[in-house]
Every structure is written in structure tokens, then in C-alpha cells.
Amino acid sequence: MFSFALHLIARDFRLALRRPMDVASALFFFLIMASLFPLGVSPEPELLRQLAPGILWIGALLSNMLSLPRLFAEDFQDGALEQMALAPYPLFLLAMSKTLAHWLICGIPLAFLSPLLGLQFDLPPDALGILFVSLLLGSLALAGIGAVGAALILGLRNGGILLALLILPLYIPALIFGTSAVDAVTHGLSPLPYLLLLAAFTLGCAVFAPLAAAAALKVSLE
Amino acid sequence: MFSTPHWFKFAAPAAFYPLAGKMIPWFWALAALFGFIGLWLGFVVAPIDFQQGEGYRIIFVHVGASWMSMFIYLVMAFWAAIGLSFHTRLSGMMTEALAPTGALFAFLSLWTGAFWGKPMWGAWWVWDARLTSELLLFFLYIAFIALTRAIDDPRRADKSGAILVLASVVNVPIIYFSVRLWNSLHQGASVSLTRSPSMAAIMLWGMLFCALAMWMYSIAVSLTRVRRIILEREQQTEWVKHLLSPVTATAP
């Protein structure tokens, strides 16, 4: 059972490595989106420092969401997903492995990129660290909720825009806890309470979201 | 099959359709009666608020609409859970029939809130925790409607919608908590929504009757909608063909 999950994750990794531009374009989206804000708002460091946690978190969240439709759609189109669902393992395991794979492939690179963008926004070093940690934690929650949405929109027309409607409201707690942690650091407070809340939210999502995603997959594969 | 409670027979759309048809006029009548009493109490009997003047009277619509918008989402979650566990077709139809009414009330609540906010706070909108949560509730309704309308197969639409509603309803308390946390961090000049706790009894009664009227209206309009959904989905069945055939159309 464990090896089934490992195989699924390893397979997603191989697929991502064969087409590295798919992952890279999500990262470049993050980069471009974040660069638009100084151009659109103001390049003043004082203002940018205030806006940075929100902008970088929203950018990571949108970039995460944009790569979500790929999570199940390609396997669904070529029939691989049905074969995986036929395997004698619970669908929960499939949903969880896919979620983890998405986190590893999409979420973690975004978290690693974020301190670099934070530098552009003149964030102090300790805030950069917290931004990284909060995105590392939070993107697992984003992947979990996102998997539910991606499973629900499988094979629907207009799926991409629908996905945004479905999951963005559910992303809000992660956004608030994550940005509050970074804000707390820039104001000289301890980010720990917010990070713990974020961790709690993430753990809840990591456990319960694959259940919902599995139910949604079952409905979509019928 | 279920043997003990005989009301399970109304889980079949064919049995529920005539029952709903009989109930609808009663709920409309009750809605009109309660609405009349509530508005009469609210606009004629209730005194002018000494702090807020005539403007406060919008609460007679606003409070009821907010209650209904939250309550209807819970009812949808209830039907979604029933539908997923018992595979009753009617539950999905009920969930779908309730959603537009819930969205309407969420919108009304925001809109009347803005009308209240402008004279009282001098702003149409403030990023208060309650307002923000109500806005997010409105988004959740829109998400449900968008998802179910995007799926052509009604069975899949019902089940996907049910999963979405249940996943969201679990999240609602977390969202509410996080918005309150965010609000307490970010709100500068705080606006208190609860500044007149000692409300005159007559105002409370007016509000209650208006809320009851909205409740009855919601039931009447969702039953009407569910009857239409039943007819649409069951149009291949014998009883619908029989019902809609010109010969029997005059029969009750």
C-alpha cells in the first residue's frame, strides 16, 4: 500500500522532470505577477514592504491554483486515472499521493522562490525566513484543497475558471494565517501563533481534504 | 427498502411532487401574513430610534436576510449529507433548489447592510469581520451554483455539489475564525455593529415576524423550484407524461 503511494509520487515526479517547463511556467507566473505590483502601485520601499506578504502569498496561491487542473486532467484524458482507480487500493491513497506530489513539485519550489521575490520587496531577513516557512507549510494546505477542486472539475467545460470559484474562498484561512505570520515578524512580534494556526489548518487539510477529493474522484470517474 | 417510517415514501419525486404542490399555497399565505405583521410592526408601530433615526428600519429586512442566508447553507449541507448517504434523488434536487434563494438572501443582506452603513458609518462598505464573512458566504453560494450548472449529468451534478457543500460547510467556522483574527489585526478605526444591544421589544417582534416571513417565502419558493426540477429531470417517466398530457391536465 505504501509502495503504491510511493510509485504514484515517483511517477508524477518523472513526468514533471520530462516536461520541466510546466513547472517552470508556474514559477515564472509567480515572478511576473509579483513584478507587476511595484509597476502598478509604486516602487517606494516603505509601501512595498507593507504590501509584500499579501502580494507574495496571493501570487503563490494563484500560481498554485493555475497548475492544479493538470493534477488529474492529463491522467483522466489518457485513461490512466481510471486504471489507478481500479487498483486494489482505496481512492483516498490515490488522492493523497497526488496531493503530496503536487506539493513537492509545485508548492515547494514556490516556497523556495518566495524569499528571492521578498528581497525585491525590501523585506527584512527574518521576514524572508518566515515567508519561506509559511509558504512551505501553507502550500500543502493549498494542494489539499486544490485537489478537491481539481477532482470536482474533471472533464468539465470551463473547468479552469470554475476551479477558481470553487477553491479560492476555501484558501482564505491559509492566506490570513500565512500573511499574518510574516506581518507579525515585520512588526517585531512573534510569528509563532500564526505559524501554529497555519500548521493546524494544514494538518486538517492534509487529512480531510484527500477524503473529499477521493469522493469527488469517484463521482467524476463514474 | 425502508419499512418503518412511512414518510420515506415522499423521498420519491413522484410522491413528493403533489405534496409540494399542496403545501406551496399555505407557505405563501403564511409568508404574506407574517410579512404584513412584521412590516406593519416595523414601519408603523415601532418608534424612531433616538440614535439612528428612521434609517435603522432597514434592519427589519437586513437581519432576517442575514439569518436566512446562513441557515439555508446549513439546510443545503443537511440535504447534501442525506443525498450522499442514502442516494435519494430528491435530496440533490432540494440542495439545488435552495441555492439561488440562499444566494439571493446573502446578496440582500450585503446590499441592505450597505444601505444601513452609509448613513450610520458614512461608508457603503467596511472590511468588518461580519461583512467579510457574509461576502464569502455569498461566494460559496456562487461556487455551488456555478459547479452544478456546469455539469450536464444531473446525478453527477448532485453528488459533486453535495461534496462541495459539505467541504465548504466544514470550512465555514474556520473561515469565520480566520476572518475575525484578521479583522482584529488590521482594523484601524473600529466600527461596532453591536452598539445597541438593548433593543425595544416591539422592534424585536417586528424583526422576528419579518424573519419568519422570509423563512416561509424561502420554503415556498424552493418547493416551487424543486417541482420544476422534478418535472425537468423526470420528463421521461410515465407519471410526468401522464401529468403533462392535455387530457389529464385539467384534473387536480
Image: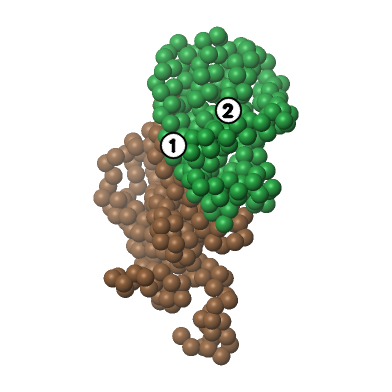
Chain colours: A green, B brown
Q: Is residue A96 left or right of residue A43?
A: left
**Residue B188 placement (x, y as % from top left):** 45, 24
The picture places residue B149, in percent across and down from the top left corner, at 59, 57
Confirm whether residue A168 shows in the render.
no
Identify the chain of the residue marked 1, using the numbered disc in the image.
Answer: A
Mark 2, chain letter?
Answer: A
Which amino acid lies under the numbered mark 2 shown in the image of this protein? Leu
Callout count: 2
Q: Position of residue A177 (x, y in %)?
A: 46, 26
The residue tagged 1 is A207
Q: Residue at x 52, y 30 (%)?
A: A140
Q: Residue, x 65% and y 36% (percent of image)? A: A66
Mark 1: few/some/many CA within 10 Å (<14, 14-19, 20+): some
| Residue at 48% from the left image edge and 61% from the top image edge | B92
Residue farthest to the bottom, as pictured: B247
Badge 1 or badge 2: first in the primary sequence: 2
Q: Residue at x 44, y 17 (%)?
A: A191
Q: Which mark is residue B54?
A: none
Q: What is the residue that sits farthest to the top in this orientation?
A: A125
Disc 1 is placed on an element classified as: helix
Q: Amino acid at mark 1?
A: Val
Q: Is residue A67 visible?
A: yes
- Image height of B142 relative to B197, above or below: below
Say which residue label 2 marks. Answer: A104
